[in-house]
Image (cartoon, grey):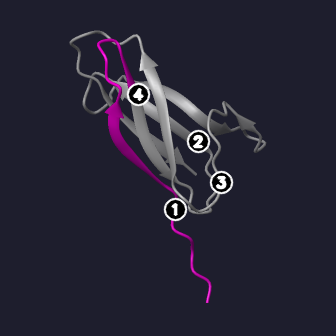
Amino acid sequence: MIEPASPSTATTVNASSVLTTSATLNGTVDPNLQSITEVRFLYGTASNLSGGTTKILYELDDTGAETNVKVTLSGANPIDLAWTLTGLTNGTVYYFRIEALY
């Protein structure tokens, strides 16, 4: 019997090292042996991230070549990812999430 593999998943984890103008965004990506084409953090001041900003950590171009590679993704085990966001405005609430596309 052949079963389809489960899709890759991304889990947002609480931010760490939160200071007045910077914070480290954290997440976990589980490739689950799938071909991930992009991993990114989205962040902004709206809880629904409308008008937010995207920080790409990993991307494949149209030919399948890696671009914007800031992390290594492979295998079946979850991978912890972090990215330090700077230039935040003191006293402002920011929201974020991690996404994995395949």
Look at mark 2 in the image and give the residue it sits on: 38
Lower sequence index among marks 4 and 1:
1
> Which span of residues is magenta-colored?
1-23
First in residue order: circle 3 vs circle 4: 4
Amino acid at the residue labelled 2? Glu
Q: What element carries label 1?
A: loop
User: Between marks 4 and 1, how big is the CA–CA gap?
Assistant: 26 Å
| Residue 42, horizontal then vertical, whole percent | 42, 31
Q: Which of marks 1 and 2 is nearer the N terminus?
A: 1
Residue sitting nearer the eye, 20 or 95: 20
Asked if residue 7 lies in the magenta stretch, the reply is yes
Q: Residues within 10 Å of mark 2 (few under 14, many from 20)?
A: many
Q: What residue type is labelled 4?
A: Thr
On the rendered structure, is 53 left or right of 4? left
- Sequence-wise first label, 2 or 3: 2
Disc number for residue 24? 4
> In this rendering, would 61 be left or right of 31?
right
Q: How far apart are marks 1 and 3 (CA)?
A: 13 Å
- Amino acid type of the residue that numbered disc 3 sits on in the rendered structure: Ser
Q: Which residue matches tag 3? A: 74
**Closer to the camera: disc 1 or disc 3?**
3
Q: Nearer the viewer, residue 69 or 84?
A: 84
Helix, strand or loop under label 3: loop
